[in-house]
Structure formats: structure tokens, C-alpha cells
Image (spheres, helix red, strand yellow):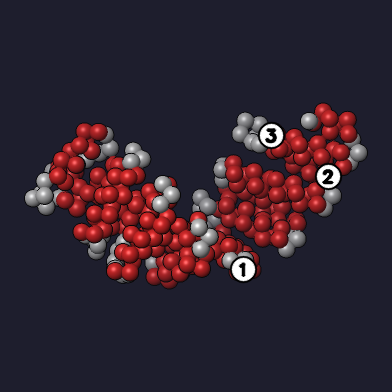
Amino acid sequence: NQADAIGYNEDALELGESYLAHSDYHIYRKETMVKLTAAYFNVDNYDRVLELGAEFVKDFPEHRYGNNIVHFMGFSYMRTGQIAEARTVLGGYLQAHPKAPLAQSAHYWVGLGDIIEQAFEDAVQHFDTIIGNYPDGNFYIEARFRRAVCAFGLGDYDDAKARFDQWGTDFPANHLRGEAEVFLGDIDAYYAKVDSALAHYALTETFTAKMNLVDHAYFESVRLLEANERFEDMIALLDQYMERFQDTGNLSRAIFQIGRAYESVGQPEVMIQAY
């Protein structure tokens, strides 16, 4: 049938749109909408994803495909910065259909939007709902991670640490592990547990290649070492950073800080060379 033929090229998009344009075509309408939404998502046409998604959620609120649709919608809302719209559309859906198959996905994306806007108390409700009601769902692991982020955002560092520690134990190879190590490092740094913080920061690059996280881990480590006058360790860590990330790292910042370290140990001539 036509629905099964829909892929990700322009002809397929045209075919899907042609099918939906016929209001009297009903047999494969739901399947076509799902496949077409996925196709637009794969070519980054987020506006059309949101249009089709809103129509699907309105017309088929209890359908089993809804979780996929809402996932595409949620990502699209976040990518385009439409957090208020996500709260209106997906939050409104949750109020009308709190137990529907789409609910866990809607809770996740509304909660993530709340985190982005630092509305952590609101986000907690959404992630707690996923954790409590969908332990076998697709969003359970990330919901537990985001719940720990909420605790951190609310300043409850003891709770955040307990949650991140348990999450890392339960899901040691998850793609968010590197970010979890950054949070754990920040918590230990806050409590002046320097060696423990350094250990967490050192693990970050083992689990992620995202340079914003790697940079945070290295330069927070440098800050701790400098504050504790461990200048030799500071120099060694910065040398390691520049060697490993000479093509992708923030070398100007590293050079500036290694110069400061050499100045602190009384080697200004090496400092000048570093600059």
C-alpha cells in the first residue's frame, strides 16, 4: 500500500502528502501520518513535524503510535526553542489524556523544557510520573537522569549525588554517563572534596566526546588544583589537555592557564614561552 512505500526522499514526501490530501482516504491514514512525520523529522523539517504531530494527537489521542509522534514533536519543540508551545500542546494533551500511550513521551519533553527554563520544581513532577508509572518505558533511564539534574538545580546536592551515583551504578554505559560524572565532580567540588571531584572529572572523557563537557571537566579540575596550590599537577593536566585535544580544544585558555601555573612556581621564562 502507499503508506508502506513512504521513505525519506522527496518523492515519498510528496506521495504521503498526496495521500493525506484526500479526506476520504481513511484506511492507512494513521500509518501514513506516522511515516510522514518520521520522514520530515529525518530531513529536519521541524515545522511540518509539529503540524502533522498536532493533527495526529488531536485526531488519534489514544493510538499506540502516539508515543513516537510525541517524541518527534518534543524534540522539534526543543530544537526550535518553542518551549512554551510544547507546554501548551503537550501539557494540554496530558491534562486531557493522562493515561494514554503518549503520556510518558509528553511528560519527558515537557519536563525537559522545564529544565531548560530552570523550572525544576515543575520538571520534578513530570519525571517522577515517568519513574513511578513507566519503569519499562523508553524514557525511564533518561527520566531518572533528569530527575537527578532537577535535584542539582534545586540545590539539594546530597539528593542529587545519591541519584547520580545510583544511576551510574544501574546504567554504567549509558550515553549520559559523561555528563553525570561532570555533575558528580561539581557536587564534590562544592563540598571541597578535591580528590573525589578530580576523579569524577577525569572519568568524563571516558564516556563522552562532547567538548563542552570535556572542557568543563578539565578546566574545573585546573581551578581546583590552582586553588589548592597544586601547580605541578595543574601543569601536567594542562599539558595532557593540549596534547589530546590540539585540534578541538580551547588551546588559548589552556595556554593562558599553564602560563599562570608556571608564574606561580617561579618560572616566568617558561610562562613567556607558554604564551
State the residue position of label 2: 231
Q: Residue furthest right?
A: 266
State the residue position of label 3: 251
Amino acid at pointer 3:
Leu
State the residue position of label 1: 156
Identify which residue is drawn at 59% across, 63% down.
Answer: 152
| Residue 102 horizontal side relative to residue 203, left or right | left
Amino acid at pointer 2:
Phe
Q: Indicate the secondary structure of the residue bearing disc 3.
A: helix
User: Can you say whether 149 is above or below 229 in the image?
Assistant: below
Residues at marks 1 and 3, CA–CA distance in whole angstroms: 34 Å
Q: Residue furthest top?
A: 273
Amino acid at pointer 1:
Asp
User: Can you say whether 193 is above or below 133 in the image?
Assistant: above
Give the mark nearer the N terminus: 1 vs 2: 1
Quarter placement of the C terminus: top right
Residues at marks 1 and 2, CA–CA distance in whole angstroms: 32 Å
